[in-house]
Image (tube, coloured by chain):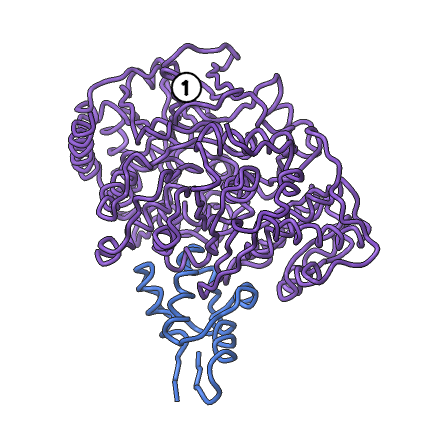
Chain colours: A blue, B purple
Amino acid sequence: MATVHIPTLFQQAALEVSGKKLDNLTGATVISKLGLDSVAVMELVAHFEEKLNIRMPDEDLAKVQTVADLGGLVKRLMPSGSEVTW
Amino acid sequence: MSKWNAPNLIAALDESKGLTDKGYTFLDRDQKELFLSWDGLRAEAMKRAAHFRKYGLKKGDRVAMVLPDGEDFVPTFLGAVWAGLVPVPLYPPLSMGKLDSYRDTMVAVLTKAEPTYLVTLSKMQQVLWAGLTHVKSLKGVITAEELKAPAPEGVSQDPAQVSDDDLAFLQFTSGSTSTPKGVAVTHGNLRANAWAIMVDGLKSDSETDHGVSWLPLYHDMGLIGFVIAPLFHKVQVTFIPTMSFVRSATLWFETIHRVRGTITFAPNFAYALATKRTKPEQLARWDLSCVKAFGCGAEPINSGTMRTFVETLSKAKLNPNALLPCYGMAEATLAISFIGMDETLSTDVIETDAYQKHRTAEPVHLTRLAEGKAQEVVNCGKTFPGHEVGIFDDEGKRLADRRIGEIQVRGPSIAKGYFRDPDATERTFGGGWLKTGDLGYLANGNLYIVGRKKDLIIINGRNYDPQRLEWLVDEMAGVRKGSSVAFSKPGAASEELIIVLEARTSSQTELEALKEAVKQRIVEQMQLTPADVVVCPVGSLPKTSSGKLQRSKTRQQYLDGTVGKEGNRTIGSNAEKVVLARHVAMSLLGRSRHRARRVVEHALEVRTVTDAVGKLRLASDYFSNRLTRLF
């Protein structure tokens, strides 16, 4: 079964798409306050989708504000039994 | 002469009847294609018009649209126009962005446009509607899904009767969320600009041409350039979802290669991004010799980016003459000037001193660039037949060739004004000329853009472009890229220069050293001493929701003594992506200015002036070699 730790994956993705080192990510971290521009965010989404083999719909992404929100969305989209934590 | 000469968009759609072999192809995120022939588009528009009428909508009523996908957007937009309604295209909410500030902007725009209904996807309805209930004019939401259903019985599907002066749609362009301005584009404007683009500019041929676009459709370049103008002149188009382009930029070139595209347009940043992402394997495989126009506009054109693009893609058989710098803005419907189809990128090197002191563009030898005594300006070509570009000084006097002043335009493409905003309309459209707010000059009928008028810093009688000063600061170690702001404030004898920037500093000593270094650099490079340098915490300077630094707001905060004290903003990072954010990230804000200007030091890969000069030398060698081969 797949195990996904959202903050870790987020950090890896941010480093890859924008060379940004993000520390101390928690579920409560508000993504729009991380200093990532909207294009970096889209690239990050693409990174998540590729890594986890899921599709995150635009209307769901619009509602995502925090790392925990993102975790909730990923959890919903992953095959049942996958462990998603944040 | 194009064989297509419909008097308006509705007639252009009506003459599509029976044309089933060509039309628009919409790709989805999985690369699946949906093809709608010209005939099919007409049928879809008629059906949607009937739905709109069933809701009681009448000619002139506004309909707001938040539809991210082309296959929904295009038939809905055309259906509204067919019924004589006035569509108001708006950008969708950002992924993981701030929904509340998005809603604030929406409310401001909708309050101005006063639409009767909002059309959106049913799944988006819930996200949007919560914040919009207090827009008084709005009666409710119509979903894109409803509009797809068979036409309601007993409702007319006849085309609306429109005259040239009737409103066709509203294009919102505001630079500030509190006072949005909707450009009132008429049916006459659309016909004129479609002709200028497709016939005078691109010399399009409906038999052989094929457009490829990933541009957002709520942005004028995507909507006018790839939906409206091609429909008038029956040039087929393949649409790539904007988000697919952002996720994978080379999909743009890949699609052109696959469908044998001939016409495409994009802002400068997209050329930089897609070139950077292109792999040798792709270059070896692609054949882009089919492209006759790689249009570049909508933001300052960086000659360095363009040269890197041409050089890289020449390995995929790109014809360098395909590169087409252009200038335009929503207030002129879209296009103002193009270079000729048989011309390639050309630039003018002008002396900085004469520009700053006398507002003249004196051509000098390229070597002066390396000495830092000159600057390079991209040629944006000539305006179209029936249109006129003039350069005016502050007193409204028309200037001669090579004198720098405000670019003004008149002709049939110039919009009626801003919707329900007589003051702003008078300021920008008054006196028969559209005041673009851009500074530039004409030389032999060709237009060169040097900067923005309102941001110009004038100190001791010399003109300084703030961006030039900001780039100098941006290059410095310790300064957060794309986060410095230059402006002036009234001083004792003249205006004084103020620099505000963001940096991470841990001690007072470090902070003072950085301030000193900034002053020194400005003095060295520009012979100008900043009266004050303010270092603020990272993320504290005001930016627009699209990530562009707000110079005027920063200036106001400085004068009020509140600069750097307003908490963290939300978006922003380095300069190159700020530009990207502005155009792709569904911004209302950056869309008004289709301008181009010289940006030589700002080549995306360039971090120092020395580097820039080196690259420029290479580029100029490359170009002179190539030109020698051509002639």
The location of residue B155, given as percent across then percent down, is: 81, 53
Image vertical order of residue B16 relative to residue B422, above or below: below
Q: Is residue B276 visible?
A: yes
The quarter of the picture where residue B629 lies is top left
Check the image and report above or below for B578 versus B347. Answer: below
- Is B343 left, or right, of B615 in this rendering? right
- The residue that label 1 is drawn on is B494
State the residue in front, B67 or B101.
B67
Q: Is residue B580 above or below residue B97?
A: above
Q: Residues within 10 Å of mark 1 (few under 14, many from 20)?
A: few
Residue B520 pos. (x, y %): 24, 33
Residue B320 occupies quadrant: top left
Compare residues A86 and B28 and report the one nearer the observer: B28
Question: Residue B208's spot in the image, x, y percent?
Answer: 43, 42
Q: Is residue B631 above or below residue B362?
A: below
x, y percent for residue B554: 47, 39
Give the farthest residue toward the right: B154
Q: Which residue appears at 44% of the width and 63% of the height?
A: B31
Q: Nearer the viewer, residue A43 or B46?
A: B46
**Circle 1: element type:** loop
Question: Residue at (36%, 16%) from the top-left corner?
Answer: B443
Asked whether B354 or B3 is in front, the reply is B3
